Amino acid sequence: QVQLVESGGGLVQAGGSLRLSCAASGRFFSIYAMGWFRQAPGKERELVAAIKWSGSSTYYADSVKGRFAISRDNAKKTGDLRMDSLKAEDTAIYYCAVGNSYQWPGDYWGQGTQVTVSS
């Protein structure tokens, strides 16, 4: 079992920045990647960024490329999502997750943190 706890969400004005953090604990034997997902009201959950746990490969959704940056610290079992130039459409609940698939690392989930961008 893996437990994940997010922090760092909040309210920010359009054009501002936020950093989300994820602290993981538990067994990581089958964990291959970490991802940050988001879900806005009335919309499906989408993967916005992913990173391989043991490598440097990263993925970003087109909507966040150039604005978001994902990172992880293997030794500390932590991950961050740096979000710059935030837009109103970035408003959503953001979830940290890990899993054995780089394309959809969603085997274990955090509780989510709200990000609200005011325009």
Image (tube, rainbow, N blue to C red):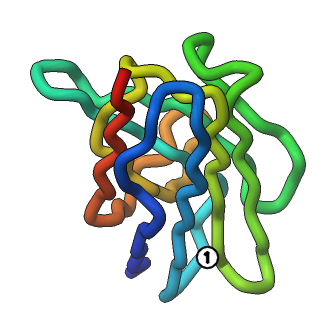
Residue at image x 60%, y 55%?
19
Apparent side of residue 3 relative to residue 57 in the rendered image (left or right): left
Please tell me how crowded label 1 is: few (under 14), some (14-19), or many (20+) other residues with Cα within 10 Å.
few
Q: Nearer the viewer, residue 39 or 34?
A: 39
Image coordinates of residue 36 in percent, x first then y, are 50, 45
Image coordinates of residue 77 in percent, x first then y, are 66, 79
Quadrant of image for the N terminus = bottom left
Residue at image x 45%, y 56%?
96
Q: Nearer the viewer, residue 18 or 45?
A: 18
Question: Does residue 76 lie above or below 64 as drawn?
Answer: below
Three-letter amino acid code at the position of disc 1: Phe
Q: In which quarter of the view is residue 75 placed?
A: bottom right
Image coordinates of residue 61 in percent, x first then y, are 59, 20
Element type at mark 1? loop
Q: In which quarter of the view is residue 72 placed?
A: bottom right
Quadrant of image for the C terminus = top left
Residue at image x 52%, y 78%?
24
Apparent side of residue 44 relative to residue 83 in the rendered image (left or right): left
Image coordinates of residue 106 in percent, x first then y, are 41, 48
Residue at label 1?
A: 29
